[in-house]
Amino acid sequence: MKSYLKVAAVVALLFMLGSIPVRNAHAEDESERPGAKEQAEVDRANKALDRVYRDLMSKDPEEQTSLKEAQRAWIKWRDAEANYIARRDAIGGSSRRVAYSEAELKLINERIEMLKRYASQAPED
């Protein structure tokens, strides 16, 4: 009788454990993280920015050094500006991450347009 009770207790315990939801860390989609969608948009915009920048660098070899310096300075400014905007606009936590990405995206898109204007004015080789 005791062995029957032990088996029943083990079965009951296994049944209870099987009904507890277990979070699978690997199954969680990365895009569900707050700010992931915005970061993906920033990544796409950065790729577009890189294409426009490379195109402009190839147009006027005499201006490459100053353009490279300007781009490096702009990147530092963009990061500081996006951080300022995020701190000003967001409460904290994941909302700050989202606000940072949104600000960064806006600044990158503005830079793309500026570089496109420069490219349209650059002398052709």
Image: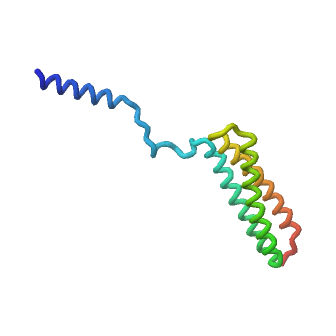
* Residue 58 sits in quarter: bottom right
Residue 53 screen position, x and y as percent = 75, 66
Q: Is residue 48 above or below residue 94?
A: below
Quarter of the rendering containing residue 78: bottom right
Residue sitting at 80 percent across and 66 percent down?
70
Q: Please say which color scheme the image uses.
A: rainbow
Residue displayed at 74% across by 50% down: 82
Which quadrant holds residue 17? top left
x and y percentages locating residue 28 in the rendered image: 49, 42
Q: Percent position (x, y) of residue 79?
A: 72, 55
Residue depicted at x 76% and y 46%: 85
> Could you tell me which quadrant the C terminus lies in?
bottom right
Most foreground residue, 67 or 124: 67
- Looking at the figure, which quarter contains the N terminus? top left
Q: Is residue 92 left or right of residue 57?
A: left
Question: Residue 72 location in percent, x, y?
Answer: 74, 65
Q: How many marks?
A: 0
Residue extending furthest top? 1
The residue sitting at 65% across, 45% down in the picture is 97
Does 8 sit left or right of 86 as displayed?
A: left
Q: Is residue 42 above or below residue 116?
A: above
Indicate left or right for 120 with 30 as reference: right
